[in-house]
Image (cartoon, helix red, strand yellow):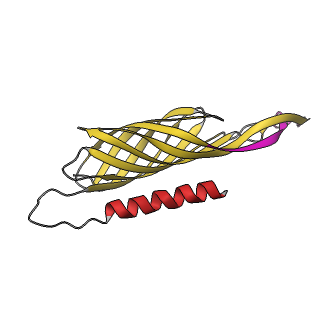
């Protein structure tokens, strides 16, 4: 990981710490909500997502830090195409829906020039290409539908990232834990 991503990760973590560590004064019965989610689903390839969310009290806005990975599995063509993303998103909640967008760092592996084929009669052989690694900035967006009890929830996340190297969209089923209500 280069310096840009280290700076982005540090900035996201610092922003979350500053926003989560507020002090409640008075007899206010409302409280901030926060959650952690893990999900799996489908983009162009199988995908996984980890996210941390913070919803401000008395305000419909929220902040989400997420990590997403989309990768080929069990492919006879090597290297496997892979795209990873870490992003900080800001958005608005409306009932059980959360709409967010922000900035992210995106990195991964594409295929370059053809190198050779390995004709193995038992496993249909493999084709090898030059691995091409990339790093770029992206514009992530997501729509989350969350249904929950006080501490646990389940939801569906429609997500995407528009960037210069490998844009993607996908759908994940996620499990949530935290202060949901």
Residue 60, image quadrant: top left
Q: Is residue 26 above or below residue 173?
A: below
State which quarter of the image contains the N terminus.
bottom right
Please state the extent of the stretch shown in magenta in the rendering. Answer: 119-136
Horizontal side of 99 relative to 7 (left or right) equals: left
Residue 136 in the image, given as x and y percentages of width and height: 63, 43
Q: Residue at x 30, y 40 (%)?
A: 92
Q: Residue at x 50, y 33 (%)?
A: 170
Q: Is residue 179 above or below residue 119?
A: below
Residue 46, image quadrant: top right
- How many marks the image carries: the answer is 0
- Which secondary structure type mostly characterizes the magenta part of the structure? strand
Residue 132 in the image, given as x and y percentages of width and height: 77, 42
Residue 127 in the image, given as x and y percentages of width and height: 84, 35
Query: Is 125 a magenta residue?
Result: yes
Residue 30 in the image, given as x and y percentages of width and height: 15, 56
């Amino acid at each position: 990981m280069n310096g840009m991503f280290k700076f982005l990760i540090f900035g996201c973590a610092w922003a979350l710490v500053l926003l989560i560590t507020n002090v409640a004064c008075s007899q206010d019965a409302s409280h901030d909500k926060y959650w952690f989610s893990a999900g799996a689903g489908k983009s162009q390839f199988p995908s996984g997502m980890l996210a941390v969310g913070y919803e401000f009290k008395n305000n419909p806005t929220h902040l989400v830090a997420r990590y997403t990975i989309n990768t080929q599995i069990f492919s006879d063509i090597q290297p496997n195409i892979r795209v990873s993303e870490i992003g900080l998103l800001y958005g608005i909640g409306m009932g059980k829906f959360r709409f967010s967008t922000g900035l992210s760092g995106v990195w991964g592996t594409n295929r370059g020039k053809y190198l050779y084929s390995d004709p193995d009669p038992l496993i249909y052989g493999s084709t090898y290409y030059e691995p091409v690694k990339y790093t770029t900035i992206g514009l992530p967006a997501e729509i989350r539908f969350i249904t929950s009890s006080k501490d646990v929830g389940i939801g569906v996340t429609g997500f995407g990232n528009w960037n210069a190297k490998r844009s993607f969209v996908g759908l994940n089923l996620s499990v949530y834990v935290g202060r949901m209500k």
